[in-house]
Image (cartoon, rainbow, N blue to C red):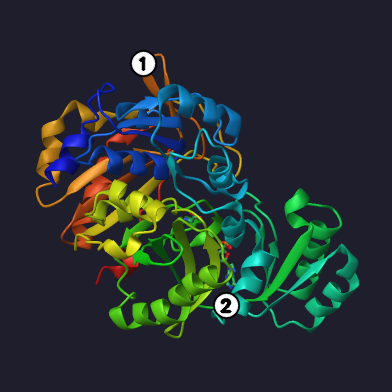
Amino acid sequence: MERLRKTNFLTCRFLKQTDLKILILGSGGREHAITWKLSQSSEDPALYIAPGNAGTLELGENVDLDPNDFKAVKEFCLKKQIDMVIAGPEEPLVKGIYDFFKNDSSLQHIIITGPSAHGAQLEGSKAFAKSFMKRHHIPTAAYREFDVTKYEEGLEYISRHPMPVVLKADGLAAGKGVVICENAEDARREFSAMLKDEKFGQAGKKVVIEQFLKGIELSVFVATDGRHYVLLPEAKDYKKIGEGDTGLNTGGMGAVSPVPFATNHFMQKVVSRIIEPTIDGLQKEEIDYRGFIFFGLINVDEDPYVIEYNCRLGDPETEVILLRLENDLIDIIRAMHNGTMDKVQTEFSQNNVVTVMAVSGGYPQKYQKGFPVEFRYLKNPEEIKHLTKKGGVIVFHAATKPDKGKVVTNGGRVLTVSASSTSLPESLEIAEEILRQIHFEGMYYRGDIGNEFVK
Ligand code: AMP
Ligand code: GLY
């Protein structure tokens, strides 16, 4: 925990003379957490974050680079002699950054987290993911897919479907492409908006209509080389803006790990019914997958079903799971790349970790940016030491940027406070205590993250 404490003071670190150079693509809380975890490595790598935020700046060098501009990423990698590239978000992966590196002889020596564009279709196309699950007998909600040529058929399918029903735009739609409809009229309207009015553009050219599953959600992560895998700690994400899980969906308002209902018994079902058939399926279909798989699961009466696959780590889940992972993340990334995942054994801290996200007023709808963020607690680091006797606390920036020596808000989810201790109530208390000492105009956070698990 000493390490957690140390980094919390966000003392400015300058780039050091080191052999290993790592480029992290992305700018959110997940990428700050990945950068922090890499900064803990005994290899002491030099870290570059593109584009990064005001938090990552404390751990490495921010690079003004668009992760989807592969040519610019290439130039930077060659110029700086980068050894390893980690893609945080899904977009560059779905667009094929892994294949771009693999197929370019000047980049082939660089270790890059995957999957290939083919593997990333697990997230990039809901229809692809559903048919993959069907082929490999992986439990998921019953579904049918429709395009504009089957529009009438789709309307009829909705009329016969029990309510609620779930409509999903096939492609990436910035987390907004899933709509749960309570009645057939709403479902028909939504179906028409997706297919005819192109509400989600290209992403909605195909629509998956699926059975609504009732249960509690769980995020499970593995690191795989496409043949072997290791489990990472699981987490529960809180998606709704309001306390008591009310209001609009967000990117995630907080998370906890471990998750009490993810018992050994339940996780054995997850492994045998979902994870192993998925890895076998990748192998059978010769899909090059050297990266993370995020299984978005739902627990329906003690049986796990897949709601979605993601081809990357979750946000804000990463901000809790990496605090529990005791392995060096660099070892895991090398093993994914080299196909030696069977040689890796993961170890997790048994601490209860929570993260609570502070967002801009108005989020997930309209909000303003550019407000200064005050970290009042930083004036008194001793106070944090006191708070973290049995664990640690760390602030991960999610959407901030440096501005004339200050930190200002730069998006909806601004920062998240992750706290780790031997008990969940204590971690919640620590996170709350720190949040009370952080201020920006319009700041809002949920005060009930993890409360359901406190007896
Ligand atoms: P996704 O974008 O696929 O993560 O879906 C967003 C959210 O919609 C999920 O986290 C679930 O809360 C919900 N959802 C998606 N599919 C279903 C389903 N078949 N049944 C119930 N809820 C669902
Ligand atoms: N926390 C959900 C996601 O990363 O998609």
In the image: residue 336, left or right of residue 173 = left
Q: CA distance from mark 1 to mark 2?
A: 49 Å
Residue identifier under label 1? 405
Provide residue 13's location: percent of width, then percent of height: 25, 24
290 horizontally vs 11: left or right: right
Q: Residues within 10 Å of mark 2 (few under 14, many from 20)?
A: many
Q: Residue furthest front?
A: 105
Residue 415, compared with residue 212, is above or below; it is above
The residue at label 1 has a CB less than 8 Å from ligand 2: no
The residue carrying mark 2 has its beta carbon less than 8 Å from ligand 1: yes
Label 2, on which residue? Answer: 140
Q: Position of residue 338 (x, y in %)?
A: 38, 53
What is the total number of numbered labels drawn onto the structure image? 2
Q: Residue at x 33, y 76 (%)?
A: 261
Category of crowding for the residue at label 1, using alpha-carbon neighbours closer than 10 angstroms: few (below 14), some (14–19), many (at least 20): few
Secondary structure beneath label 2: loop
Q: Amino acid at mark 1?
A: Gly
Residue type beneath disc 2: Thr
